[in-house]
Image: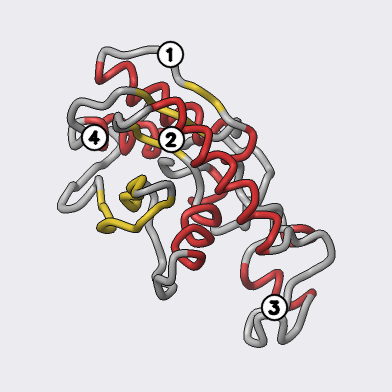
Amino acid sequence: HGQSEWNAAGRWQGQADPPLTDLGELQATHAAQSIGTVDAVFCSTLQRAQRTAEIIVAALGMSPVVTLDELVERHAGDWQGLTRAEIDVRYPGYLAEHRRPDGWESDEDVSARAWAALGAIDRWLDGGEAVVVTHGGIIYQVERDLGAPFERISNLGGRWVDSVDGGFALGDRLELLEGAEITVPNQI
């Protein structure tokens, strides 16, 4: 998805639902120009993903966007809404030691949701191609489950996931904003 208000403020979002910034909307518009013909666009039910998907389908002349609850971001527990600095103060050593707070959604639960969504999408597409607008936590979990090392992903970055012989395989990482210099016009 494009930049949200909390991305811009450096806040952990989890399943909180901040909207896109003006820059995030421009990013989605630019990203749509990098997408060729697809059969469908799916997204998380969180507004930052939904708005990004709506912008993409409008630019592609498609409709509707198909929302799936299973594509929402990992719940970040007590860290939702906090910055890294606030987490370090309230939970000393947690980040460095890869510890997580109360309410943090487990890898197993995120994985189950992600694979349920991808299975449903695969059945719906029946060999077609789709854009799936989701969140970093979902992408990281799918990559981890398929053996890829962790690598930070940017807004409107993504990963090809191919349906192969009843399973899934990772394709290339995508950067839909690569080389783009997107700025928000000054507002009065």
Tell me the distance, in whole angstroms, between the alpha carbons under discs 3 and 2: 40 Å
Which residue type carries mark 1?
A: Pro
Instruction: Count the labels in the image.
Output: 4
Which label's residue is closer to the chain start, 4 or 3?
4
Q: Give the spatial CA distance, label 2 vs label 1.
A: 17 Å
Q: Nearer the viewer, residue 124 or 39?
A: 124
Please say which color scheme the image uses: secondary structure
Q: Which residue is mark 3?
A: 88
Q: Name the secondary structure under disc 2.
A: helix
Left or right: residue 7 versus residue 156 is: right
Mark 2: which amino acid? Asp
Residue 89 x/y as whole percent? 74, 77
Q: Earlier in the sequence, mark 1 or mark 3?
A: 1
In the rendered structure, the answer to whether residue 94 lies left or right of residue 124 reads: right
Numbered tag placed on residue 30 in the rendering:
4
Q: Residue at x 68, y 43 (%)?
A: 16
Instruction: Read off the residue under disc 2.
Output: 122
Q: Is disc 3 placed on a helix, strand or loop?
A: helix
Residue 179 lies, with reference to residue 27, above or below; the image says below
Q: Which residue type does callout 3 highlight?
A: Asp
Among numbered discs 3 and 2, the one appearing first in the sequence: 3
Instruction: Say whether residue 88 is left or right of residue 6.
Output: right
Q: Height in image: 8 above or below 19?
A: below
